[in-house]
Amino acid sequence: MIVHLKTPLTKEETQKLRIKDSVYISGTIYTARDSAHKRIIETESPVDLEGAVIFHAGPIIKKQDDDTYQMVAVGPTTSTRMNPYQAAVLDQGALAVIGKGGMDEKTAYALKRNGAVFMAAVGGCAALYVSSVLKINNVHWLDLGMPEAVWELEVKDFGPLIVTMDSTGGNLYQEVRQQNNL
């Protein structure tokens, strides 16, 4: 099934999603890697996480002469690095996480508990994804460095994204391992 969503998301929307669904997102998404996740749970989020979409990405950004920023490339980073923090961030209201490679059981339980989903973005498609970024609305915690900062992106039809872990406990990674007797 192909689904188009607009942020902020609602639990009613994310609880309907199932593994293998293809999703496109419009609205605001936030990039956050491990340093940002750690700071979110140690202090507080610089953005409202209620219904938010978090993208595990370290974008390549170019600062313009007028002090604005231009997105050069944005692709997923390995999500397992966020395992120590992701459940706590989901508990603060985020309803979707985009990344690469799946996440652990603690995160899977947090997805169920919060009615949230994990969606895979295809690695190597940074040019495709950047074409969906309309503009950079803001940046938070630039002191962490450009790839680790929280970038607030306005996107249109950001995707395709594949739901790989859903709010019912569905896990495409486990399903594939079982089918291949791994």
Image (tube, helix red, strand yellow):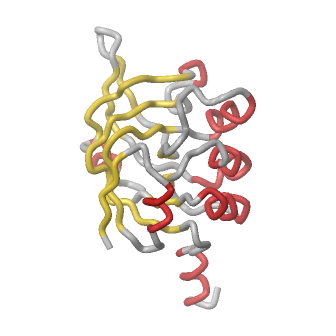
Q: Position of residue 13 (x, y in %)?
A: 43, 59
Work out whether residue 93 or residue 139 is closer to the camera in this orientation and state it: 93
Query: In this rendering, would 96 be left or right of 169?
Result: left
Residue for point 31% across, 46% down: 26
Q: Is residue 20 above or below residue 149?
A: below
Query: In this rendering, would 45 be left or right of 77?
Result: right
Work out whether residue 25 or residue 179 is closer to the camera in this orientation and state it: 25
Q: Position of residue 124 (x, y in %)?
A: 38, 54
Residue for point 69% across, 63% down: 109
Q: Residue furthest front?
A: 12
Can residue 174 be seen from the camera position used here?
yes
Q: Position of residue 128 (x, y in %)?
A: 27, 50
**Quadrant of the frame with the N terminus:** bottom left
Residue for point 43% across, 31% down: 152
Q: Is residue 142 above or below residue 159?
A: above
Q: Position of residue 105 (x, y in %)?
A: 71, 65
Can residue 54 be seen from the camera position used here?
no
Work out whether residue 40 or residue 145 is closer to the camera in this orientation and state it: 40
User: Residue 163 falls in which quadrant of the image?
Assistant: bottom left
Q: Is residue 16 above or below residue 13?
A: below
User: Residue 116 falls in which quadrant of the image?
Assistant: bottom right
**Quadrant of the frame with the C terminus:** bottom right
Query: In this rendering, would 22 be left or right of 38?
Result: left
Q: Residue furthest top?
A: 66
Q: Is residue 167 above or below residue 65?
A: below
Residue for point 57% across, 22% down: 141
